[in-house]
Image (tube, grey):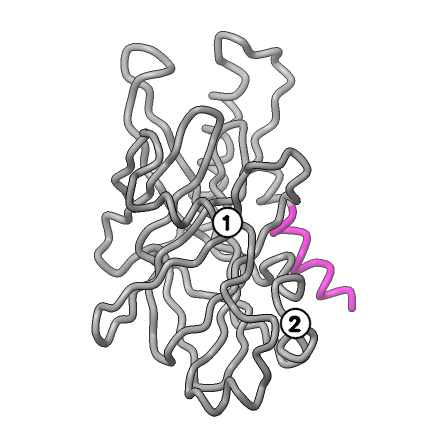
């Protein structure tokens, strides 16, 4: 579950990605007929990075097709506008096949996280067929930061879970494509068990309340997320 990462300025190879963030990579005039004729598919996804006190939408993810290793970047969010919604989806037209999420770049104030999974299989996988319009859900990347000497220096490890629904999937598609959108959540690679998630939540809570500038009232975004996940099965059962 460990993941290598970079805390650095924007990489030069990613400048074009950031410049156009927050917009769909699919023509607003693409029709279902044209999509089927092209033999391609449409994939929609959202990605968030969760740490001890912060949860933010990520800038982009890279998808790698398992069959031939070809990669494609999916633009998600720019973080340039303070009014940007908390749930931001990206859409992209891709060739059919099985894909892995291999890289994610996520922004925080004055820092860029480039998350690369230690597992060669990636952070999550999905399969898509020709002519399909698929909502792959929301990939949640969880950072566990282990401080060394001070709370600002240390190492991070990352795990991933997937939640159904990308939040704003229909907003990045035209009406015709949105009408054919089906939910098919990605499969997280080696996700933490419920017990492990609970331990991560408690670790985040302790870190958030033990910092130099802590007020003692901080809550962990991961703990809130786990609460939402636990409530979802109960809500479905009542129906």
**Residue 186: percent from left, percent from top:** 45, 65
> What secondary structure is marked by label 2?
loop
Magenta segment: 228-239
Crowd class of label 1 (few under 14; some 14 to 19; many from 20; radius 10 Å): some
Q: CA distance from mark 2 to mark 1?
A: 18 Å
**Can you tell which quarter of the image residue 223 is in?**
top right
**Residue 66: percent from left, percent from top:** 26, 71
Residue closest to the far top:
212
Which residue corresponds to the image point at 31% horizontal and 56% vertical from the top-left?
A: 102
**Residue 110: percent from left, percent from top:** 44, 24
Which residue corresponds to the image point at 53% horizontal and 74% vertical from the top-left?
A: 134
Q: Which mark is residue 174?
A: 2
Q: How many marks?
A: 2
Crowd class of label 2 (few under 14; some 14 to 19; many from 20; radius 10 Å): some
146 and 38: which is toward the camera:
38
- Answer with left or right where residue 97 lies relative to residue 186: left
111 and 48: which is toward the camera:
111
As drawn, 86 above or below 133? above
Which residue corresponds to the image point at 33% horizontal and 43% vertical from the top-left?
A: 115
Secondary structure, magenta segment, majority class: helix
In magenta stretch: residue 128: no
Q: Which mark is residue 139?
A: none
Which residue lies under the disc numbered 1? 21
As drawn, 130 above or below 135? below
**Can you tell which quarter of the image residue 216 is in?**
top right
**Residue 26: percent from left, percent from top:** 52, 69
89 and 238: which is toward the camera:
89
**Can you tell which quarter of the image residue 62 is in?**
bottom left
Quarter placement of the C terminus: bottom right
Which residue corresponds to the image point at 49% horizontal and 64% vertical from the top-left?
A: 25
In magenta stretch: residue 231: yes
């Amino acid at each position: 579950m460990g993941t290598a990462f970079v805390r650095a300025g924007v990489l030069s190879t990613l400048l074009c990605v950031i410049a156009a963030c927050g917009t769909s990579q699919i023509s607003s005039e693409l029709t279902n007929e044209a999509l089927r004729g092209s033999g391609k598919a449409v994939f929609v996804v959202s990605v968030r990075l969760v740490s001890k006190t912060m949860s933010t939408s990520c800038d982009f993810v890279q998808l790698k097709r398992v069959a031939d290793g070809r990669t494609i970047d999916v633009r998600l969010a720019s973080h340039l506008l303070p009014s940007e919604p908390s749930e931001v989806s990206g859409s992209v037209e891709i060739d059919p096949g099985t894909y892995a999420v291999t890289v994610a770049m996520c922004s925080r104030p004055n820092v860029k996280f480039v998350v690369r999974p230690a597992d060669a299989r990636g952070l999550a996988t999905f399969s898509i067929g020709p002519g399909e319009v698929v909502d792959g859900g929301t990939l949640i990347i969880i950072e566990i930061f282990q401080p060394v000497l001070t709370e600002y220096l240390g190492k991070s490890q990352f795990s991933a879970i997937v939640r159904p629904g990308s939040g704003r999937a229909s907003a990045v598609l035209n009406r015709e494509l949105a009408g054919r959108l089906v939910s098919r959540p990605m499969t997280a690679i080696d996700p933490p068990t419920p017990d492990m998630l609970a331990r991560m939540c408690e670790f985040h809570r302790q870190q958030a309340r033990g910092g130099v500038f802590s007020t003692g009232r901080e809550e962990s975004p991961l703990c809130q997320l786990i609460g939402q996940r636990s409530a979802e099965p109960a809500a479905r059962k009542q129906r």
